[in-house]
Image: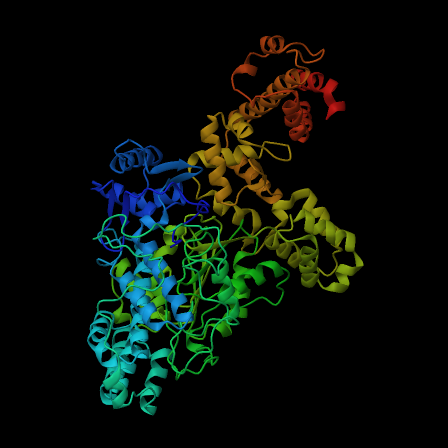
Amino acid sequence: MGVYVHQPRRRGPEPAPSDIDIWILGPLRISVGGREAALRGTRIARLAALLSVNADAVVPYERIVDVLWDDPPESARQQVHNVVGALRRALARPDGTTLVVTEGPGYRLAVPLAAVDAYRFQAAAGSARQALADGHDEQALAVLNKGLTLWRGPALSGLRDSRLANAAAVLDEQRLDAVEAATGIRLRLGAAAATLGELGALVAEHPFRESLRALLMRALLAAGRQADALAAYEEGRRLLADELGLDPGPQLRKAHEGVLRGEGVIPAAAQASAPTPLTEPTEPTDPTNPIKSPNTTPNAAPPIDPAPETTASQDPIAAPPTPAQQKPEKPERYALPAAAAASMTRAQNARLVNHPPGRPGTVAPTLTLTEPAFTTPGVVPAPRIDRSFLPRDLTEFIGREHHIRALVAQAGLGGPAPQVAVIDGMGGVGKSTLAVHVAHRLAPRFPDGHYFVDLSGFCAVTEPVEPTQALEALLRASGLDPDSLPEGLDERSALWRARLAGRRALVLLDNARDAAQIRPLLPGTGETFVLITSRKRMPSLEGAVPVPLEVMGPDSAIALFSRIIGTARADAEPEAVASAVELCGRLPLAIQVAAARLRDRATWPVERVTSQLSDHRTRFLVAGDRDVTAILAWSYHHLAAPEKHLFRLLSLHPGPDFDAHTAAALSQTPLPDAESALEHLFEANLLQERSPGRYHLHDLVHDCAAELQTAHGQAEDQVDATERLVDHFLRCAIQWCAALTGDGAANGAGTVSQHTETYSGLETRPVKRAKDPAHAQRLLETELGNFVAVRRLAVTLGMWDRARLLAQVLGPHFGLL
């Protein structure tokens, strides 16, 4: 399913427990050793559902918190441990072994995929797809029917709140796709009359699902009931207009045209000789049966290896062959592509072959039907002018070619689920500019609307837009009568998904606060592309592709500066231009502000801007309502108090980078708390990570932190933090140099004990332990730039004894570094 997967699934078979069955296609049930587990308590059930949806994959701690609480308590981490412990006890085998294992940043339900009914259902869909590709319609229908028997009601019944609704919606959509596929096969086999009862009931249950109504119209026409087919269309048209304010989509319109032309009518003789529907499906000829029902014994079917070491062509549940391998299509034949609105392209086919269902990297492909035979492929209606709300694109857009290619490629992937991309980065890095530029480039591909909402997640003057408000704006932009707008969040979210179902639309959600603000705004199905921008990384947003945005490269930064001030002026002072963009940290917003100020002063040379940036950068990077430092500080104001305190103190560190031990010394906090605070700052894009565990502040972010420390910090706290920082590096030097010699002495600088007697604070906080001399040398090399910078700071602040001792300890070893 791949709905919440953040870590790749394990390769190779898990030790396959034949005594485990997990059912999520209906109310959640888990059986261990023939005993149904008692999942007492809402949080235990939610956690069980989340891990089951992501069977055999690591679910991060942050995602678990999102699912268990709307507003996580301060004790969330401990409570997660308690819930996991209770679930482990509930799922324990008779021998005491557990199915819930701790792994990396989260937890994993260690079961084979074959233990979960949803994966068996998807395996059946894959087998049916292969059977259709091989021309075996009856076999495909039998497998599909048997797979559909696994369903016992809506997926995750009783747990379909906002935190698990997306996973349930994806599963329910896969079931409807399979039902449509099976119905289409029956029509192909000439059993149109026998499908009418089931299709009528499905259309009544899902009146706005145009693909179902199109199938019903086709079945009515094939049964010789053309007038009833036209009446079904008219009923759907009225419902769409009255309830949603929409016109019929392309699929329903084309079905209507086919009915008017009488296409697809089966002669009476053919109707008489048509086979009866397979109400009791026969076993497929393939001996590998991927289906087992919750009503059968646990070992009713052989287990499915979740990641068999085979090629795609050998995989019994692999995607269909590439177009070059497929047999020519017969007239009016229904295929099973990845997207419902068009035949599968070569690129899409290759993508599915490279990632078969249940493999890492994709959401498992679902069974969907192409348009009927009377569709006109390749015809894309012109965009609707009244449904395009994108902000203006910038003529001075420069660079980002790699990101543009990646986003355009993702938008073209298609598939049954919307494509979602999250552009994240620090303030002023150009996230919104890139998103708007890409949206304008993609606009012709999405003829059913281009929607835009500024969610104000990080803003100085307004609060973040609540999802209910955002949905009101989106629904009204889509043409909904304001009098028809429902009140509740769930109702508005459902209506928004219904209005986008079957549409090719582009949705740009700008300046998002977090994943919780985004989830209700995401479409449920269809070939919709959602672009999200945020200062915050969103690892918990299921199905989203992260697009981290860094500062511009040197050439692009110079090109942007030159375009704003004029190329002739820039060419006259190329060295000054290069220096100016570096002093702007190659941050697009800072470059635009500095260049705009220069553009408006024709008498200034570029060198003057360089001088201004060198002397008082934060004051110079202000133009009208664009204050670079203030804009960067918006991220700071959304932090918790411990992260704010650490962020301010990090401006005191003079070196090129730092780790959690340095942060702990600065803030005088335990190491785990410092690690957590750094992680939050990194997620907020206020820190950059040069190598694992080593962070640094962008120059302009450092300026911002320094101004905030001056404005909000205490002078005494700043002095104490600086002393702790110097002492931290002094302790590191003493201990590592002692380990380097292997004799406990620091080569003429005195022993560790002598230094700690002189400076009683040196042993108050631990430092990284050097395992051996080689490890000590690596640690000293890593921190060499920080040692030099901290000694210089100590001299500047008059800490003569510390500066002298640091030089004495490190001096004998500088030749080795």
Q: Position of residue 293 (x, y in %)?
A: 25, 55
Is 40 placed above or below 506 here?
above
Q: Position of residue 539 (x, y in %)?
A: 44, 48
Q: Quadrant of residue 291?
A: bottom left
In this view, which residue lies farthest toward the right?
A: 572
Tally of numbered discs: 0
Can the viewer see residue 104 in this picture? yes
Is 664 placed above or below 30 here?
above
Please state which of residues 157 and 793 is positioned toward the viewer in this rendering. Answer: 157
Q: Is residue 485 left or right of residue 111?
A: left
Residue at image position (42%, 57%) is 357
Please state which of residues 165 and 222 is positioned toward the viewer in this rendering. Answer: 222
Q: Is residue 734 left or right of residue 425?
A: right
Quarter holding the C terminus is top right
The structure's colour scheme is: rainbow
Can the viewer see residue 523 in this picture? no
Is 166 placed above or below 755 here?
below
Is 379 placed above or below 396 here?
below
Residue at image position (55%, 35%) is 693
Q: Is residue 656 left or right of residue 208?
A: right
Please state which of residues 428 and 311 is positioned toward the viewer in this rendering. Answer: 311
Quarter holding the N terminus is bottom left
Q: Position of residue 128 (x, y in %)?
A: 36, 66
Q: Position of residue 46 (x, y in %)?
A: 28, 45
Q: Quadrant of residue 769?
A: top right
